[in-house]
Image: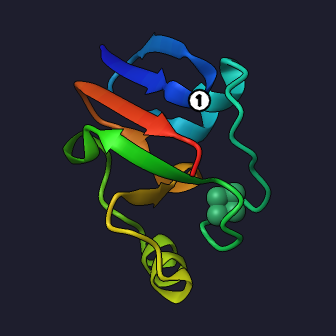
Amino acid sequence: MAKVIFKSDNKTVEVPDGSDLVQVAEDNGASISFSCKAGVCLSCLVNVNKGMENLSEKTENEKATLEGFGAKPNQRLACQCKVLKGEVEIENP
Ligand code: FES
């Protein structure tokens, strides 16, 4: 099991390894907004405070969108992330 901490919502949930972060956020009422769910609109930009190494690699769409926006190294698009293992703490930017 992996653990996701939604710092902005003061919520911690345990999820199976490999869970889609978008699904975890929606199932648990986290305050991350989603729109395209394809890595292009930036709605779901989050800061990863801890556990970046426990998230899946960036998709090509995510890389292009984050680079175009000039995102910080600790920022990811939640719709493109799987929680692979361990603990991840995210926060709204
Ligand atoms: S919902 Fe559009 S980039 Fe994630």
User: Which image quadrant is residue 39 in?
Assistant: bottom right
x, y percent for residue 88: 33, 31
Rendered residue at 70%/29% (across/down): 26
x, y percent for residue 7: 50, 27
The answer to whether residue 84 is above or below residue 1 is: below
What is the secondary structure assignment of the residue under circle 1? helix
Instruction: Look at label 1 and name its amino acid.
Output: Ser
The image quadrant where one finds the N terminus is: top left
x, y percent for residue 32: 68, 40
Neighbours of disc 1 within 10 Å: few (<14), some (14-19), many (20+): some
Q: Quadrant of ligand 1?
A: bottom right
Colour scheme in use: rainbow
Rendered residue at 34%/41% (across/down): 49
Return the residue nearer the eye: 27 or 91: 91
Q: For the image shown, how many numbered marks are present on the structure?
A: 1
x, y percent for residue 44: 65, 53
Q: Which residue is mark 1?
A: 8
